[in-house]
Image: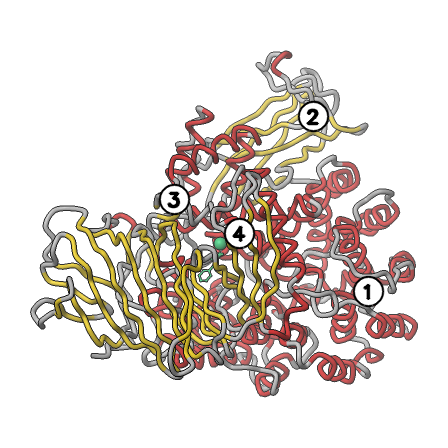
């Protein structure tokens, strides 16, 4: 009775077709028996009809072999059910009944990493979004919430640890060396939050006392070799638990909280109730093997999954169109948490850089979708930067519009009103509207319209009336789902900088007593297509500091002069806008270089001195956060520069940016070298904001200096590589060496790479970083290098982390090689990517589909490049048996 495994179901699902479930499943009793090569799942579901007569009830089920089926303990005859196309259809089911099914599944064969699968020696599950249907027949949709009991049995020697959601209620031995455990989760939940784990795991234990005094056991399960890498995750977890109590008033609600680390995982981690399952890359950390970015990622992801316990689990999504309800909100929550644990401005700069480079590109491409899409073909394709990061920006705007107290009131109301329910994004916004009395009807458009709004701001100063006016208009380019956009509600945080500092703000018609005490900062609310804001008593023509803190996810156009930008970079009170002014200044200079390049004049090009002057002053500024200094010195990435061009020429961008960077390195040689020499290589590693900042600045300086190094600089780089006491410094030195164009570096880089591998070959996560750094290497020969990496023994063809480190990094973070190809074949980079997608598609369609992204941007390039990219998309499209995941991406982008 095995079903068709390759059901290429390319039907589109629409939000407007939503119907509430015909049946509820009050109780779900699972018995999962794990044997080598096969597992058996028996399910007893208590179903209760929710509406009038139902002639047929379809349960979801994929890749299941049905062995037995009963209703109320009676076997079903052939006319009482049928199996078709991923469904088990019950014909004229009773109003209330117990459905018993027994199925056989094959976790060892499951390379999709969805459902029950095996990662190295560990059996684990991944059910979001629609993986539970690969475990048993079920109503696999988030608005069906059930009480779960899970019995797991397996060989005791192979799987001494047996875990599932909730509390352990029973365990014991069976015959034949087998044993079992029974878990019960007292909280009703949708099946996407179901999880079980079986394997030989070691555990790190701790505990947490909640605000109301309950004790919670905390357990992190890992392979024994990784037990020394759990401290940071555990500390982060406890910080997150405390923070959610303090900031949101949310306590944990079970007596045990477990995290399990597995090596094969499609995403970062998963918030299964009481049993989070993590990609090893997002939970394991120790100074010797993990970079600062890695430490921060662990902290952020541990917190993110923990925060889901309320924003996602207690209050969940009605349907998958509401995904951003839990993801946008939870990303906002984890970002604020990380900001509180470290430096808020630095965190903001990092997040905005990512958003503007990658989410804006998504919003401008063929897969653009609103944070609440109206349709999808394959929900796995909608775990996007738009749903997550833009979704978080939208929550951030709401939080800022309300202010901290009202926002907290609003989230309290939301959690209280909807506890135990599956709800929509409107419910979330409604709670915030109810506590504040604010009208969010225009604001709601952020949920339904895709695309990045563009603000055009023009200013005007009248010396006689001393009035200063900002004329602001907004427009949003057409996206696939909607050509004609209605105006968005856009909060614009701002101030005005005069010659002598910030100017007091008074809008025309505003009463003096209405003014806030700090009246140099204001939030203007744009709700129409065009509005003007008039400030009075403005003593001089100011420089406007607009969109402070990046107060809305928009593109801002204002004709800043370079002198304006210098003023903002050096003197604005808003840290984010100081960074932003540096970026704009640097972007302008790089665009000058691009123009010189296209005129064949790059050799004679000298950058605008004001950029250097700003950098020089920043390097001397006392009290400036070292991380902010590093980010202000960092030139915009090639990806960000590309986003700003009407037609992208990745090779020219690489050349122009490199030219400017080389010039800066030479001009600032002395102060940059001083940064390096003042750095204390022996200082014991701590992942604190201050220390992370010091390393970031030092490694930024190193990267600049290694562009055109003399022997002394190369020696210093090697010294840092050899004496580093942490992975951040070790990897940064190796990266600088490998990326350098200097023959002095090129002569020794291969040996240093080999040494690094020899030293770290048993640490899988370090090997990933080693692969990624080579995949990112912008020196000529990139395609040949990644091809060689695929053949390296360290590469594992089915492991998503390895695939991302080589293929994903090459296609997304090495534009000059990806688009440059080889001497023999300029399309070699595109062909390489398509080959990888095609090879992976039948094994792991989710990862395959994700890899396609860079090719979907073909319209942004010139005819020849774009055509070649498009050609590879066509090739993928015509692959026989292409997954619905890849099919959706390819067909929407052609
Ligand atoms: N819900 C997970 C998170 O954001 C992400 C995820 C989605 C993991 C789908 C696995 C599969 O925390
Ligand atoms: Zn999430």
Q: Earlier in the sequence, mark 3 or mark 1?
A: 3
**Viewer-side residue, 559 vs 128:** 128
Residue topped by disc 3: 448
- Which numbered circle lies on residue 306? 4
Q: Residue at x 70, y 51 (%)?
A: 588
* Cβ–Cβ under 8 Å for marks 3 and 4: no
317 is higher (above) or lower (below) than 667: above
Query: Residue at the left extreme?
Result: 79
Q: Is 310 or 582 nearer to us in this picture? A: 310
Mark 1 or 4, nearer chain start: 4
CA neighbours of label 4 inside 10 A, class few (<14), some (14 to 19), many (20+): many
Neighbourhood count class around disc 2 (C-alpha, 10 Å): few under 14, some 14–19, many 20 upward: some
Q: Residue at x 74, y 24 (%)?
A: 540
Q: Position of residue 390 (x, y in %)?
A: 50, 48
- From the viewer's perspective, is 337 left or right of 290? left
Gap in angstroms between the C-alphas marked 1 and 4: 37 Å
Report x, y in % for residue 871: 43, 75
Residue under numbered circle 2: 520
- Spatial CA span between label 2 and label 3: 34 Å
Q: Residues within 10 Å of mark 3 (few under 14, many from 20)?
A: some
For numbered disc 2, what is the local secondary structure?
loop
Q: Residues within 10 Å of mark 1 (few under 14, many from 20)?
A: many
Q: Earlier in the sequence, mark 2 or mark 3?
A: 3
- Image coordinates of residue 686 in percent, x first then y, are 77, 57
Q: CA distance from mark 3 to mark 4?
A: 28 Å
**Badge 2 vs badge 3, beta-carbon distance below 8 Å:** no
Identify the secondary structure beneath mark 4: helix
Q: Which residue is mark 1?
A: 702
Secondary structure found at label 1: helix
Q: Let me know if residue 875 appears in the view.
A: no
Q: Earlier in the sequence, mark 3 or mark 4?
A: 4
């Amino acid at each position: 009775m095995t079903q068709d495994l390759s059901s290429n179901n390319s039907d589109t699902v629409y939000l407007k077709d939503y119907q509430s479930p015909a049946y509820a499943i009050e109780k779900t009793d699972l018995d999962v028996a794990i044997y080598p090569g096969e597992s058996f799942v028996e399910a007893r579901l208590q179903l209760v009809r929710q509406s009038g007569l139902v002639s047929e009830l379809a349960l979801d089920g994929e890749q299941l072999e049905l062995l037995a089926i009963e209703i109320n303990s009676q076997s079903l005859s052939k006319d009482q059910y049928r199996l078709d196309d991923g469904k088990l259809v019950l014909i004229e089911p009773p109003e209330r009944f117990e459905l018993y099914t027994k199925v056989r599944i094959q976790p060892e064969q499951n390379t999709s990493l969805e459902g029950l699968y095996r990662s190295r020696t560990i059996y684990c599950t991944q059910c979001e979004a629609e993986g539970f249907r690969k475990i048993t027949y079920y109503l696999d949709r988030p608005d069906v919430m059930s009480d779960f009991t899970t019995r797991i049995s397996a060989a005791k020697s192979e799987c001494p640890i047996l875990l599932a959601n909730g509390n352990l209620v029973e365990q014991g031995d069976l015959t034949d060396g087998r044993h079992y455990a029974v878990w019960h989760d007292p909280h009703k939940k949708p099946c996407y939050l179901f999880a079980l784990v079986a394997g030989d795991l070691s555990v790190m234990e701790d505990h947490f006392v909640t605000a109301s005094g309950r004790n919670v056991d905390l357990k992190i399960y890992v392979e024994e070799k990784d037990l020394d890498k759990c401290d940071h995750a555990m500390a982060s977890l406890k910080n997150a638990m405390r923070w959610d109590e303090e900031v949101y008033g949310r306590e944990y609600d079970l007596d045990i909280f477990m995290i399990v680390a597995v090596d094969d995982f499609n995403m970062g981690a998963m918030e299964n109730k009481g049993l989070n399952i993590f990609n090893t890359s997002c939970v394991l950390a120790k100074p010797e093997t993990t970079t600062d970015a890695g430490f921060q990622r662990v902290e952020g992801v541990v917190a993110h999954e923990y925060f889901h316990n309320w924003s996602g689990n207690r209050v969940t999504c009605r349907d998958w169109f509401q995904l951003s309800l839990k993801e946008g909100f939870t990303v906002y929550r984890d970002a604020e948490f990380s900001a509180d644990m470290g430096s808020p401005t630095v965190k903001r700069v990092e997040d905005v850089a990512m958003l503007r480079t990658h989410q804006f590109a998504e919003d401008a491409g063929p897969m653009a979708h609103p944070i609440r899409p109206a349709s999808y073909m394959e929900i796995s394709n909608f775990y996007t930067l738009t749903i997550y990061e833009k979704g978080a920006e939208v929550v951030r705007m709401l939080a800022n519009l309300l202010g901290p107290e009202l926002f907290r009131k609003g989230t309290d109301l939301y959690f209280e009103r909807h506890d135990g329910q599956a709800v929509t994004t409107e419910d979330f916004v409604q709670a915030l509207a109810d506590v504040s009395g604010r009208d969010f009807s225009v604001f709601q458009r952020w949920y339904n319209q895709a695309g990045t709004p563009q603000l055009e701001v023009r200013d005007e100063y009248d010396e006689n009336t001393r009035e200063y006016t900002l004329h602001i208009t907004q427009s949003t380019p057409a996206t696939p789902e909607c050509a004609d956009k209605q105006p968005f509600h856009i909060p614009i945080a701002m101030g005005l900088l005069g010659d002598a500092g910030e100017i007091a703000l008074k809008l025309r018609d505003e009463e003096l007593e209405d003014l806030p005490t700090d009246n140099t900062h204001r939030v203007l609310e744009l709700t129409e297509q065009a509005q003007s804001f008039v400030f009075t008593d403005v003593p001089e023509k100011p420089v406007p500091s607009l969109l402070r803190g990046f107060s809305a996810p928009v593109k801002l156009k204002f004709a800043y002069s370079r002198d304006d930008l210098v003023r903002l970079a050096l003197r604005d009170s808003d840290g984010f806008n100081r960074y932003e002014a540096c970026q704009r200044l640097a972007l302008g200079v790089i665009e000058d270089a691009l123009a010189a390049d296209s005129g064949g004049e790059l050799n004679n090009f000298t950058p605008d001195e004001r950029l250097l002057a700003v950098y020089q002053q920043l390097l001397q500024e006392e009290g400036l956060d070292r991380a902010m200094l590093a980010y202000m010195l960092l030139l915009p990435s090639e990806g960000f520069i590309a986003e700003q061009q009407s037609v992208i020429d990745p090779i020219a961008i690489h050349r122009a940016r490199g030219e400017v960077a080389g010039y800066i390195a030479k001009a600032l040689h002395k102060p940059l070298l001083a940064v390096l020499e003042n750095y204390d290589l022996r200082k014991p590693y701590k992942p604190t904001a201050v220390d992370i900042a010091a390393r970031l600045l030092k490694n930024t300086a190193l990267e600049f200096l290694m562009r055109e190094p003399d022997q002394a600089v190369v020696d210093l780089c090697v010294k840092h590589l050899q004496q580093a006491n942490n992975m951040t410094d070790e990897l940064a030195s190796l990266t600088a060496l490998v990326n350098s164009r200097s023959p002095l570096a090129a002569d020794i880089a291969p040996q240093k790479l080999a040494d690094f591998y020899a030293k770290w070959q048993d640490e899988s996560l370090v090997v990933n970083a080693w692969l990624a750094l080579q995949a990112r290497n912008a020196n000529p020969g990139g395609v040949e290098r990644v091809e060689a990496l695929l053949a390296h023994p360290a590469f594992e063809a089915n492991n998503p982390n390895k695939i991302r480190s080589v293929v994903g990094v090459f296609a997304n973070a090495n534009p000059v090689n990806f688009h440059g190809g080889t001497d023999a074949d300029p399309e070699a980079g595109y062909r390489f990517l398509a080959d990888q997608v095609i090879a992976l598609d039948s094994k792991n369609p989710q990862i395959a589909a994700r890899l396609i992204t860079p090719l979907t941007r073909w319209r942004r390039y010139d005819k020849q490049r774009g055509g070649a990219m498009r050609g590879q998309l066509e090739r993928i499209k015509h692959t026989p048996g292409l997954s619905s995941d890849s099919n959706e991406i390819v067909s929407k982008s052609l």
